[in-house]
């Protein structure tokens, strides 16, 4: 028999500790996802711009970065950060630092590709028109190309942000207490896996769905000629 | 036709007098395709030069070289007293003094008409918003669409968009205006509203290089017609002489094709 009483009884721990990260364990899904999305996107903008740079000294390392991190599993990047980096640096890194660094580094590769594609989606004539009134390359990028590119990027960006948001559940494997880990902790005591994991699935789904609804208002509308 | 000169400053005086564009033995290749062969051509201040020729003859490439949108591989190109073909030429500065109008308008779709026109003066000339806006409104009067200031490009007709593009270029008070097939993407009923604006500009003394198939415009407005084919300047002559008695076979063949339908 299903008994969702177990969810109600542990609601505070699951949501306040696991989801928000306000509790004795630190952690928290939102506390990880929000800065990871913001920093990953920021780094991604620079990587996307670097991939389009004229100088191969800038372009090739950016391309290598994208190909490297797109080609390895996220779990492996988290393990690197968790086991290898502390040994190399000879200092321990807390779970939060490990998880955030891993996500930012990994996701920036994907965001970088989205930014690059978005910039390339802006017609060449726009760059020429901007140049022809005397704007420098940087000014043309800032005032003409990026505003149009960002709008074109919205659907792929939101998809990637949702993916990242859900992937934060992987941080539980190094002991970071996010929503998934909180459910595991409760389940170890209560042995109610069906109810607990169904509940956190609903929480993830509700967040992802709200993100996708919220993003729809920023999507480009088809422009009539 | 009443004068459309909105601002008091006489146009065409911002550049130096005398020769303002000079091609000296200019060559350009796209890969192994020789698109400009040994071009020699000079344009005087205040002159209106129409460049015509069959498609693929290099005429668009020719005027795109003038503001450095296309680099040249050999020869010298002087524009408004600067040698722009040397390494390290300040291209943004040059382009702010040379206006360009494109076949496909290339207005910035995320900005209103007014913002399109004000962008260059504000970002490049560091004009204040107030100055830029009053100048932009003056230019919209001049191209006869003052009521479209706050519209977005997507809500304008092709002819209106091209007139905004002309106003955007004029906002930088250029010494030279380049037109790259400005009416080729327009529906026939909108061609004249754009040609009228260009005619007024020519009458006001603007130096213009115009790539176009509008031979009526060339006859009425041009001081000189340059005929190109295969990347070479085949012939240059005043419009009267060119249309009445072109010297080269290729020019006569071209004219017979475009004037007989």
Image (cartoon, coloured by chain):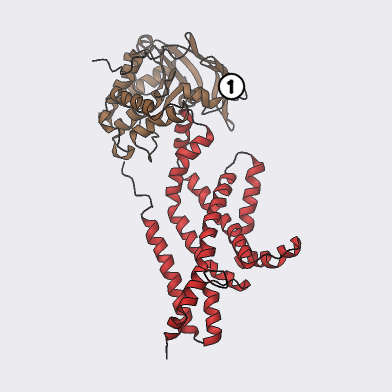
Q: Where residue A194 sits: x, y (%)?
A: 47, 84
The answer to whether residue B254 is left or right of residue B96 is left
The answer to whether residue B141 is left or right of residue B20 is left
Which residue in the protein does label 1 denote? B85
Rendered position, A134 above or below B42: below
Q: Where residue A211 sits: x, y (%)?
A: 42, 61
Neighbour tally class for label 1: few under 14, some 14-19, many 20 plus, Cα within 10 Å: many
Q: Where residue B218 sits: x, y (%)?
A: 35, 17
The answer to whether residue A25 is left or right of residue B179 is right
Give the drawing colour for chain A. Answer: red
Question: Quadrant of residue A79 in the image?
Answer: bottom right
Rendered position, B4 above or below A6: above
Question: Quadrant of residue B10 in the image?
Answer: top left
Chain that appears brown: B
Q: Where residue B50 sits: x, y (%)?
A: 40, 18
Q: Is residue B43 visible?
A: yes
The number of numbered discs placed on residues in the rendered structure image is: 1
Label 1 SS: loop
Rendered position, B255 above or below B117: above
> Furthest-bottom residue in view?
A1
The answer to whether residue A166 is left or right of residue A213 is right
Q: Quadrant of the C terminus of chain A?
A: top left
Residue under the point 58% across and 58% down: A104
Q: Which of the pair B9/A97 is nearer the observer?
A: A97
Q: Quadrant of the N terminus of chain A?
A: bottom left
Q: Which of the pair A216/B44 is nearer the observer?
A: A216
Q: Which of the pair A59/B132 is nearer the observer?
A: B132
Which chain is indicated by disc 1?
B
Q: Is residue B229 visible?
A: no
Residue under the point 57% across and 22% down: B27
Q: Which of the pair A132/A9 is nearer the observer?
A: A9
Residue under the point 37% across and 19% down: B255
């Amino acid at each position: 028999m299903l008994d969702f009483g177990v969810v109600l009884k542990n609601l505070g721990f699951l949501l306040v500790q696991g989801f928000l990260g306000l509790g004795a364990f630190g952690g928290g899904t939102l506390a990880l996802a929000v800065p990871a999305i913001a920093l990953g996107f920021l780094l991604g903008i620079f990587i996307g711009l670097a991939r389009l740079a004229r100088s191969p000294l800038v372009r090739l390392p950016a391309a290598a970065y994208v190909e490297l991190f797109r080609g390895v599993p996220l779990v492996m990047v988290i393990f690197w950060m968790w086991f290898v980096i502390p040994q190399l640096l000879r200092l321990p890194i807390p779970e939060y630092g490990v998880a955030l660094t891993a996500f930012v580094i990994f996701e920036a590769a994907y965001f970088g590709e989205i930014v690059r594609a978005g910039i390339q989606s802006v017609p060449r004539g726009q760059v020429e028109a901007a140049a022809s009134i005397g704007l420098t390359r940087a000014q043309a990028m800032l005032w003409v190309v990026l505003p149009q590119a960002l709008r074109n990027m919205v659907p792929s960006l939101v998809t990637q942000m949702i993916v990242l948001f859900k992937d934060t559940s992987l941080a539980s494997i190094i002991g970071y207490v996010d929503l998934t880990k909180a459910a595991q902790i409760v389940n170890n005591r209560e042995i109610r896996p069906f109810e607990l994991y169904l509940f956190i699935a609903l929480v993830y789904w509700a967040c992802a769905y709200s993100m996708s609804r919220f993003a729809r208002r920023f999507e480009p509308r088809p422009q009539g000629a | 036709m009443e004068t459309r000169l909105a601002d008091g400053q006489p146009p065409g005086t911002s550049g130096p007098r005398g020769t303002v564009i000079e091609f000296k033995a200019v060559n350009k290749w796209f890969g192994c395709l020789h698109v400009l062969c040994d071009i020699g051509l000079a344009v005087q201040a205040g002159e209106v030069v129409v460049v015509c020729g069959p498609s693929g003859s290099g005429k668009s490439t020719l005027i795109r070289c003038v503001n450095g949108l296309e680099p040249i591989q050999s020869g010298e190109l002087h524009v408004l007293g600067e040698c722009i073909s040397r390494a390290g030429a300040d291209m943004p500065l040059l382009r702010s003094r040379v206006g360009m109008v494109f076949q496909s308008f290339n207005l910035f779709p995320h900005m209103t008409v007014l913002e399109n026109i004000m962008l260059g003066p504000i970002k490049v000339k560091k004009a204040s918003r107030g100055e830029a806006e009053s100048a932009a409104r003056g230019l919209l009067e001049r191209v006869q669409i003052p009521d479209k200031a706050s519209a977005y490009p997507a809500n304008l007709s092709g002819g209106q968009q091209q007139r905004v593009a002309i106003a955007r270029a004029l906002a930088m008070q250029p010494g030279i205006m380049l037109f790259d097939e400005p009416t080729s993407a327009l529906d026939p009923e909108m061609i004249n509203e754009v040609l009228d604006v260009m005619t007024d500009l020519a009458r006001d003394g603007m130096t213009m290089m115009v790539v176009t198939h509008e031979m009526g415009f060339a006859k009425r407005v041009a001081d000189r017609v340059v005929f190109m084919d295969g990347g070479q300047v085949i012939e240059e002559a005043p419009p009267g002489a060119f249309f009445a008695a072109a010297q080269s076979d290729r020019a006569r063949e071209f004219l017979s094709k475009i004037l007989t339908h």
